[in-house]
Image (cartoon, helix red, strand yellow):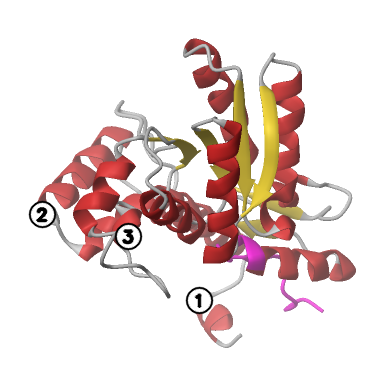
Amino acid sequence: KDDKYIALGGTGCSATSQSTANIAPTVRMPHISWAAVSAVLSDRTAYPTFFRTRLPETSSNPAWIKIAQQCNWTQLIVVKGKDSRFGFQATGFIELASHSNIRVLELESILTKKDAKRVVSNIVSSRVRLVLMITYETSIQYLMCESVSAKVEGLLVLTKTHGERFWLADYKGKNTDQCTDMVMTKRAESMIEVGGVGFRSDTTNLSCVEGMSSADYKAWWDDFVEANKGTQVLRVANSVAGNAADGVCMLALALRQVLAAGMSINQLRNR
């Protein structure tokens, strides 16, 4: 039919995208995400119609390897979250490390506080203080807090970029007596995050915003940051704004193409 949907766009969460990307090929529909970063979604056999405007998390692996080489680190422990979400990236890092003279002593999972206690015990017995964490924020909080309880000093955590000051967020079962904001912030000083939001600052016109250049957008963002310092708005914006902007631009271009093909705004609204 002329009015059938031709693509699926807008899903950001990796877990949600995995579910919808499983279905999309059965109806021969492209699926485009603006923020899903799970390395699992790079499997073209499993997700043949999935596309995204953001780099997969595996792009962090070479950066972590380079940091280790620059610092002459030759062994570490890898901690991952849920295997269906982070196992693919963890396995990829271990393979890359094996070709880079970096020894992975253990591959662990942290899903609970009990898991974190076990991992901290292994860190103590192995006498290694370098831990790569391929997981969500809560798993890192578990590890940081358990290392405080076990009086483990010198722990250095490598991870991807998470929300601003994520280590201060509450979570179920948090030991607030020992793991105070001050203590957790001190632990976070021994953390290296790989990631970030990049901006072009030249006069190239943006294809999806008429009359705005890359430099104009960067200036607008700087003003936004200044106006929202110290607020929850900025904390959220810093973690997703770059990806959201790409997603909005992608959808705007798709809408422009649909309108150019002859479909009216009213027809779109009636869907």
- At x 54%, y 56%, the residue is 116
- At x 89%, y 69%, the residue is 26
> Which residue range is magenta in the image?
1-15
On residue 179, which mark appears?
Answer: none
Q: Where is residue 28? Give x, y as percent.
A: 85, 64
Q: Residue furthest left?
A: 227
Residue located beneath label 3 in the image: 236
Tell me which label, 1 or 3, sits earlier in the chain.
3
Q: What residue type is disc 1 on?
A: Ile
Q: In front here: 43 or 100?
A: 100
Q: Where is residue 179? Give x, y as percent.
A: 30, 59
Q: In front here: 112 or 161?
A: 112
Q: CA distance from mark 2 to mark 1?
A: 35 Å
- At x 60%, y 33%, the residue is 126
On residue 227, which mark appears?
Answer: 2
Residue located beneath label 1 in the image: 265
Q: Is residue 225 visible?
A: yes
Q: Is label 2 or label 1 in front?
A: 2
**Magenta span dominant secondary structure:** loop
Q: Where is residue 140? Give x, y as percent.
A: 47, 52
